[in-house]
Each structure stands twice: as C-alpha cells, then as structure tokens.
C-alpha cells in the first residue's frame, strides 16, 4: 500500500539522515488550494454574509433619498470687455488681468450667499412625506413667509401641513393642530410664526394623502452650510470660465440656487463699478454748487461795475496785441483750471481715509495721475470684496492697506509735482501777459478793470463746462454699466447620481464576503490547535506518523466492519507491522497508547486497535494501564473495582488469567485486563518487578498486548512503563491538541524518556482531511459519499 511504503521510507530516511528530513519538511510551498478549501468549508457563513449585506444594501437604497448633481458655467469678463463705452479712456489704463481665486472667494462668501438665502427663502425646506421616505420638493402649492421681529426671523422647528377641503391643517409635535382657511388674511394669522396662503387660488388642490413637512432653519446657518456645499472651480488652468456645482435632493431647488448665485454675483460686480461713477457724480455736484455761487458773484460785480462807470460798449481798438493777449489769457485760464482740479483732488484725498473711493475722471490732463487714481480705486474695491470673508487681522487685508497707503503717497507726490509744473508754466504766461498789458496801458482804466472781471468770469465758466461734461460722461457710464460675467450655461441637472445600485450592491457584496473572511482569518490566526497531517509533520519531522483516524460517530451502527473507521484501523495495523518488522522476537508485541493530555481519545484508539488486531484472528490483550483515572471499564459497562491490572501488580499470588475478562463476544480473540481499583502508589507498582513479570507473561500468552496508559503531561506513569515496550503510539487529536504540546512530544523523543514513538492523528474530520475519505481518502468501501460542491470545483486534494 502506498501509505505503508511512505511510512517505511520515511522511517528509514529519518534514521539515516534525520537532519535532512528536518530541513526538507520546512521547504514547502504555499498550499493555495488548501487555503481556499479551509475557508470554503464555511461556505454557509459567506452565503449568509452576502445575503445579509445585500439586504442592508437594499434597505439603504430603499430609504436613502436620491441625490442630483447641478452645474452652471460663467465667464469672468475682463475690464476691457466690461468697458463697452469708456469716454475717458480708462480701458487703456486699466489692468485686464484676472484673479479667479478672488472671484471664487466672492461667490462662496457669506455676504453674497446670505442674499441668495433671503431671495429664495432657503431657510424654509419643503418635504413631501411618504410611507418609505420623505422627498424634498421645491415647487409647492402654497406660499409661506416667516414673520420677523426687529429684523430677525421668527419660528423654528418642524411643521406638518395637510390640505383639507376648505383650509390648511397645520400641526406640530405635541401641539394641537390648527386649521387656517384658504382665504384668511395675513393680519389674522397670529397664532403661528409664519403666514401661509395658496400660491394659485384658482388651481386645483393636490390630491396626495400625504402631508407636507416644513423645516425652518436659521438663515445664517443655511448660508454657512451653502458656502460649504457649493463648489466653484476654474474649468481649466488659465481659463476665465468658472464652474459652479451643487449636490441636492431636489433638482429644481439646486438649479434655482445656482442661478440666483450667478445673478447676485453679476449684480455685485456691477454695483462695485457703479459706486465709482456715483462718487464722481457726487463730487462734481458738490463743485457745481460752489462754482455757481462764484459765477453769480462775478456777474454781479460786472453788472455793478458797468453801472458805476456807465459802460455799454467796449471798442476793439487793439489788433495783433489784443489777439496775442487773448491767446495768453486762454492758456492761462486752462492752466488755472488744471491747477484748481489738482488742488480739489488733493484736498479730497487729504480729507478722507483709505476706506473711500476717489473720483475717477474729473478732467485732469495727466495720464500718470489718472492711472494712479484708477489703481487706487481697484484696491479699495478688492479690499471691500474680501473684508466680509476675512477678519480684521488677516494678512491679506493688511497687505492691501499698506498698498493703499503707498498709492495715496504716490498720488500726493504726483499732485505736488503736477502743481509745481503748472505754477512754472503759469509764471511764464504771466510774464508774457505783463508784456501784453504794457501795450494796453494806454487803454482807459475802466476797460482794463472790466477785462479783469470778464477774465475771472471766463475762468469759472470754463471750469463749469468741464465739470458738466464729466458729469454727463459719468452718468452715461453708470446707466450703461456692463455685466461682470457672461453666462455660459445656466444651471442644468443630471439624473440621480447617488445612491448607485451597482456601487451599493457591489460594496455590500464585497463587505459581505470580507467580514466572514476577516472573522475566519482572525479565528484561524488565534487558533493554536493542530488539525492536519502536514502541520504535524512540520512540527515533529523526526517522528513517523502511523496513520490518521477519522472522526468516530456516536452511532455505533455506523462503525461496521466495512466502514471507513474500521478500514482506517486496519491500515493502522498494517503500518504498525512495518514499524515493528525489525523486531526479530517471535513473542507477542507490546505497545502503549498514550497522549499528552486528557481527552485526546487514546482509550478509544486502544479499544479499536485491539479490535482490529482481533479481527485478524490474533490473540490480543487490552490492558487498562491508566491507574490514576481509569476509563476502559466505561466502554464495556464493567465495574470500576473489578479485579485487574492494579491487583496483579500489588498481589504477588494473583495469576494473570484471574485478571482477564472477555466482555465483547463479537471479538473472541480479544481479552481485557481492566485497571482495577485505584492504588495509592501507582508509580511504585509500575516500577516494580511485578510489572515486568506481567509483560513477560503477556508476551507468552498473546500476539499483541496494548496498554492504555495515562497522559504524559499530567503524570509520569507512562514514562515509567515505556522502557520494555516495542512501540509507543502517541495520539494527537485533530482540533483538540494544542501546538505548544508538540514541544513536549519533541523533548520526550530527544531526551530518550520515551522510545520507539510513532504519532497517530485522531478524530480527523472531513473538513480537515484535505479531501480524503478516512484520512487517506481512497474511499474503497460500500459507503457512497456526496462530494461538496466546492471540492468539485477545486478537485480532490491529496
């Protein structure tokens, strides 16, 4: 037989090269099939985990609201795109570079989103209740407005609204429902923190039997939550297009929010630019009041002067000199106008702090000054845009304030330089004018005085006309303010993106397999028991394995003569014969059956082994050698104190035949010597000459003598009885013997305390048999076995 040859070959190889055998036993590859079969033995756990996980996934899909994805796209316009009508040339002076990060911060700012919340009343959520789940809705057949007190919204919590034939039935937790008629005026709805009315009184009422659930929240909290949920990002690097996205349970609600955010953001940018032009208009209007008073004063002086000197007509008696004088006066008037505008801008800049905008274009003919003022206003707008989202100590705001201070100094310095230049030019013109005045020295004094008054009048009128022109330009800019953005796509929603059935069921199936696998992996890792023959060979490579005994059923009828159990003991008998073939003695062989601890099945193994020898017509003596805790009598229904082994050892006159019993009539060649009464000095009895005499007489009378002895870890009796024996059959029980005990077995063998040892793996279940029917699995019996499905897939292991 294949097994017996392997046992013999292994035994001989261990005797010749024990060290090589020890090394070879560890050079094993990973057994993938065995690994999988070990887990597939618990296929029902995986099936239960899969079904349970899929049930959880089904309930999750059933009760989880669907989520939709909505997205809008806008293009941020540059300054040169916005200035479609720039009469002052600001387009060529402005900076067209964009900082999309700042635009993203503005869109997600609390200030802007608070306006969206107030516009759409997002502090009120509407749900249509159902049997399974509540669905968020946007378009409801009624209008709710929260009452306000000192600019604060009243009411919070959850209300249920049910339609009846003539009104609303409004209820709240633990409160009495209130009924409000459809036509009740708002002034009479005083019992609730809100007013309610039909959105369309002529429209048919909804027929749904389910009520609406109304949830009131704090507007500030809703704005903060919206700032966290809305997503804004550039579509590509360097692109001027921003994408705005929002996830929500209601497509209509998400689209309305995104469209409102786009509209508010556009209005916010337009208001910023309109504020600059409005400041310019306000500044010019204030100057108009002052100039009007000065013109009235000059005209009054002129009228009084003419009346006093009775002047009605001034003759033009100066030709070329008068013309030159007029040109000089015109140039002087222009310089004085520029000097006045520069002084007015300087006074306005020195009188205000860095929080106010400067008038944009008041008519200064200095490109550098206009550019500085435009840059100063852009910094003011940028700081006003960022300050609501940042604290006062924010480094960005401090940096902007420093830039404003530097810009302010630059403007003041430029104004000083420009004034000095104007004064120098004015001085030269005044010198020229003095020359021309000498020509007019011969004119009457009254005419010269009148000319002086008229010159002042012309100066003020020119300044008045310049400011009037600039006010008209600013008014046109304000009226035709271009939008800040261009809408690429208004908000559009896709189909439901979550929960996805494929993903949910896939994850649940994965978890359903993973959890049982993890549990089994932990149990297998923490399990310190021996199960398989390979584990035993790896732990004790120097000891031969005589065989494997399958799990013994409780029903004795299943252990008939052709059963797997009976066949396994016949194979064991054959293997033991090959292990003992070197013994030349013709007398009976004496073997011991022992184990490390109690409960490993050594007594049952001894009984079945004795029966196997008896079935081969060999005279067998089964001895209850465990004098501390005898169990042999329990299997045969005998009295515990029957005359037996302990009596023979303690009574010199007692004969061996007087201790023998034959309780099993099915096996006539089997004799049993029970343990007898428990002696107080078992080690002394086993160490005496009487024990050796018992073995000699047994060898003479029987072919095989089998001693059922005590466990080796608990007592030393088995070690004392080992010396004159032919074989020690050491029982290791699958699923019961701990791996640490293999060190104890190894020490017994190496120290020589127990010789002629052979291992026997007992109680091998089908799940641990690596596919064998009864340890070796040849299945040569009349029992038909159903092969598990997973073994049909992976094949029968060997």
Image (spheres, grey):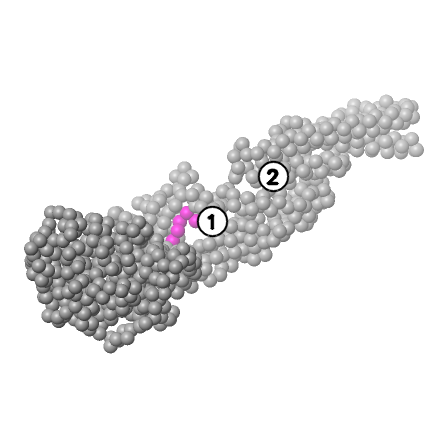
Decide: is 379 above or below 675: above
Give the x, y percent position of residue 481: 63, 47
**Callout 1 secondary element:** helix
Spatial CA span between label 1 and label 2: 27 Å
Give the magenta-colored segment's residue range.
Answer: 122-126
Horizontally, residue 153 falls left or right of residue 97, namely: left
**Residue in view at x 67 percent, y 42 percent:** 474
Would residue 715 be visible to someone looking at this image? yes
Decide: is 257 above or below 5: above
Give the x, y percent position of residue 332: 82, 30
Magenta-drawn stretch contains 123: yes
**Residue in view at x 20 percent, y 68 percent:** 613
Decide: is 202 above or below 559: above
The circle on residue 229 is 1
N-terminal-most mark, 1 or 2: 1
For discs 1 and 2, the disc positioned in front in the rendered view: 1
**Residue in view at x 79 percent, y 31 percent:** 335
Q: Badge 1 local density, few (<14 within 10 Å), some, or many (20+)?
A: some
Q: Quadrant of residue 584?
A: bottom left
- Quadrant in which the C terminus is drawn: bottom left
The circle on residue 381 is 2
């Amino acid at each position: 037989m294949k097994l017996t040859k392997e046992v013999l070959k292994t035994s001989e190889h261990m005797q010749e090269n024990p060290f090589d055998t020890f090394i070879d036993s560890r050079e094993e590859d990973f057994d993938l099939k065995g690994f999988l079969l070990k887990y597939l033995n618990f296929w029902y756990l995986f099936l239960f985990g899969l079904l349970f996980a899929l049930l959880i996934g089904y309930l999750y899909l059933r009760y989880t609201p669907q989520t939709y994805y909505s997205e809008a796209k806008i293009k941020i316009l540059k300054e040169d795109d916005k200035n479609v009508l720039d009469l002052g040339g600001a387009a060529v002076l402005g900076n067209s570079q964009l900082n999309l990060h700042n635009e993203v911060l503005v869109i997600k700012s609390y200030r802007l989103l608070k306006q969206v919340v107030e516009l759409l009343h997002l502090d009120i959520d509407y749900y249509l209740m159902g049997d399974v789940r509540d669905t968020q809705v946007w378009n409801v057949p009624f209008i709710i407005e929260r009452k306000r007190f000192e600019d604060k919204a009243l009411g919070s919590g959850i209300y249920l609204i049910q339609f009846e034939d003539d009104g609303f039935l409004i209820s709240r937790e633990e409160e009495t429902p209130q009924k409000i008629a459809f036509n009740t005026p708002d002034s009479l709805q005083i019992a609730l923190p809100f007013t309610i009315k039909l959105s369309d009184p002529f429209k048919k009422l909804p027929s749904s039997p389910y009520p609406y659930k109304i949830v009131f929240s704090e507007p500030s909290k809703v704005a903060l939550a919206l700032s966290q949920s809305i997503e804004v990002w550039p579509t590509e690097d360097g692109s001027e297009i921003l994408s705005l996205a929002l996830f929500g349970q209601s497509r209509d609600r998400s689209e309305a929010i995104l469209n409102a955010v786009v509209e508010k953001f556009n209005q916010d940018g337009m208001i910023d630019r309109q504020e600059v032009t409005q400041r310019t208009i306000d500044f010019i209007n204030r100057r108009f009041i002052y100039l009007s008073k000065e013109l009235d004063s000059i005209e009054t002086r002129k009228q009084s002067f003419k009346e006093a000197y009775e002047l009605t007509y001034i003759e033009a008696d100066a030709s070329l000199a008068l013309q030159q004088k007029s040109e000089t006066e015109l140039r002087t008037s222009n310089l004085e106008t520029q000097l006045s505008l520069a002084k007015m801008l300087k006074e306005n800049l020195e009188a205000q702090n860095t929080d106010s905008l400067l008038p944009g274009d008041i008519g200064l003919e200095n490109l550098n000054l206009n550019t500085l003022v435009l840059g100063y206003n852009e910094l003011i707008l940028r700081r006003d845009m960022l300050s609501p989202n940042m604290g006062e100590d924010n480094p960005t705001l401090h940096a902007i304030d420093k830039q404003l201070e530097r810009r302010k100094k630059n403007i003041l310095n430029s104004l000083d330089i420009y004034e000095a230049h104007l004064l120098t030019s004015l001085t030269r013109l005044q010198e020229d004018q003095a020359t021309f005045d000498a020509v007019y020295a011969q004119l009457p004094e009254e005419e010269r005085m009148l000319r002086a008054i008229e010159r002042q009048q012309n100066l003020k009128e020119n300044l008045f006309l310049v400011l009037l022109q600039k006010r008209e330009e600013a008014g046109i800019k304000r009226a035709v303010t271009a939008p800040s953005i261009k809408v690429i796509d208004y908000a559009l929603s896709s189909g439901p993106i979550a929960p996805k059935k494929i993903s949910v069921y896939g994850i649940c199936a994965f978890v359903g397999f993973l959890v049982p696998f993890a549990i089994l992996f932990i149990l297998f890792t923490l399990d310190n028991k021996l199960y398989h023959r390979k584990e035993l060979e790896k732990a004790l490579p120097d000891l031969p394995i005589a065989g494997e005994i399958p799990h013994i059923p409780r029903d004795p009828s299943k252990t008939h003569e052709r059963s797997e159990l009976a066949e396994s003991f016949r194979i064991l008998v054959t293997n033991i014969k090959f292990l003992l073939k070197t013994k030349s003695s013709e007398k009976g062989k004496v073997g011991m059956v022992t184990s490390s601890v109690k409960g490993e099945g050594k007594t049952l193994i001894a009984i079945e082994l004795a029966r196997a020898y008896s079935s081969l017509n060999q005279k067998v003596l089964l001895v209850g050698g465990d004098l501390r805790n005898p169990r042999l009598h329990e299997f045969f229904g005998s009295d515990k104190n029957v005359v037996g082994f302990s009596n023979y050892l303690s009574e010199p006159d007692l004969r061996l035949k007087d201790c023998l019993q034959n309780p099993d009539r099915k096996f006539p060649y089997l004799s049993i010597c029970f343990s007898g009464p428990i002696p107080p000095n078992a080690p002394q009895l086993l160490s005496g000459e009487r024990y050796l005499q018992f073995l000699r007489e047994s060898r003479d009378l029987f072919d095989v003598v089998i001693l059922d002895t005590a466990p080796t870890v608990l007592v030393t009796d088995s070690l004392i009885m080992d010396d004159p024996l032919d074989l020690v059959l050491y029982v290791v029980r699958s699923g019961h013997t701990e791996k640490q005990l293999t060190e104890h077995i190894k020490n017994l063998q190496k120290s020589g305390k127990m010789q002629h040892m052979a291992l026997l793996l007992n109680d091998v279940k089908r799940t641990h048999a690596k596919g064998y029917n009864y340890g070796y699995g040849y299945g040569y019996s009349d029992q038909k076995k159903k092969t598990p499905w997973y073994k049909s897939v992976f094949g029968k292991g060997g």
